[in-house]
């Protein structure tokens, strides 16, 4: 009985945290979409606008990766380690684990997620931020393609957790 109560608390906490991550991702995707529309109509963005787009790309991916890290810690109870842990985490989240959880990242957005991961790494580690507008625009398009599927994967996981919680009570 105590173990079930502890499990329920962990799962509820996971739901609350994942929902916060999804809300952050939605906000970053919406602002990115708005900036992309401005980019489309103006033909170019000012440097401050380009930097804002990069900040949104970074924030969106960070929220997604934080959600995946939470899933790895609280459900899988196994978080990748080592130099390639970021890429390994994406691989782990693409796997359906029967009896535990569905796949969280749809296979069709694997390439986009890898490119966004690389961009986040570049952005986070750049001492001098030289942004190539063409490459940033490519990342924007990848984020806008990936966002609906990534959000759907996290919502599906939330629904799965909710079904598990009804069995635990």
Image (tube, helix red, strand yellow):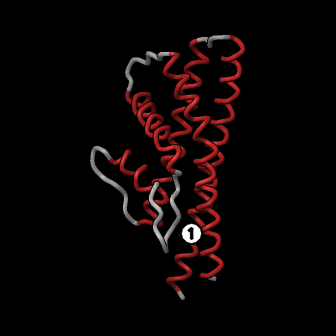
In which image quadrant can residue 156 be found?
Answer: bottom right
Left or right placement of residue 40 versus residue 86 in this view = right
The answer to whether 114 appears left or right of 83 in the picture is right
Q: How many circles with numbers are drawn on the protein?
A: 1
Q: Residue 93: horizontal and vertical position, in percent?
A: 46, 55
Report which quarter residue 130 is drawn in: top left
Seen from the viewer's position, the closer of residues 150 and 66 is 150
Residue at x-position 62% and y-position 75% = 165
For the N terminus, give its image quadrant.
Answer: bottom right
Residue at the limit of the structure toward the left, as seen here = 82
Q: Nearer the viewer, residue 95 or 37?
A: 95
- Which residue matches tag 1? 11
Q: Nearer the viewer, residue 48 or 34?
A: 34
| Nearer to me, 5 or 167 | 167
Give the vertical position of 87 relative to 118 (above or below).
below
Looking at the picture, how far across and down is residue 63, in whole percent? Answer: 54, 44
Name the residue at the front extreme.
108
Across and down, in percent, residue 142 comes to 55, 33
Other-residue count near label 1 (Cα within 10 Å), few / some / many at <14 / 14–19 / ≥20: many
Left or right? Give the position of 40 relative to 4. right
Above-or-below relation of 166 to 77:
below
Q: Is residue 144 above or below residue 95?
A: above
The x, y position of residue 120, in whole percent, is 45, 33
Residue at image coords 55%, 20%: 51
Give the position of the C terminus as an image quadrant.
bottom right
Q: Considering the numbered disc 1 on the image, is that residue within a helix, a strand or a loop? A: helix
């Amino acid at each position: 009985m105590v173990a079930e109560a502890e499990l329920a608390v962990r799962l509820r906490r996971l739901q609350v945290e994942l929902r916060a991550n999804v809300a952050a991702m939605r906000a970053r995707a919406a602002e990115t979409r708005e900036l992309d529309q401005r980019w489309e109509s103006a033909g170019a963005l000012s440097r401050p606008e380009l930097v804002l787009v990069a900040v949104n790309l970074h924030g969106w991916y960070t929220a997604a990766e934080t959600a995946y890290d939470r899933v790895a810690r609280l459900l899988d109870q196994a978080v990748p380690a080592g130099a390639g842990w970021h890429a390994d985490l994406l691989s782990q989240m693409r796997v359906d684990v029967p009896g535990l959880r569905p796949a969280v990242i749809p296979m069709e957005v694997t390439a986009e997620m890898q490119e966004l991961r690389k961009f986040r790494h570049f952005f986070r580690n750049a001492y001098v931020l030289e942004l190539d507008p063409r490459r940033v625009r490519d990342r924007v398009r990848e984020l806008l393609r990936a966002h609906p599927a990534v959000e759907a994967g996290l919502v599906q996981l939330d629904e799965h957790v909710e079904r598990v919680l009804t069995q635990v009570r």
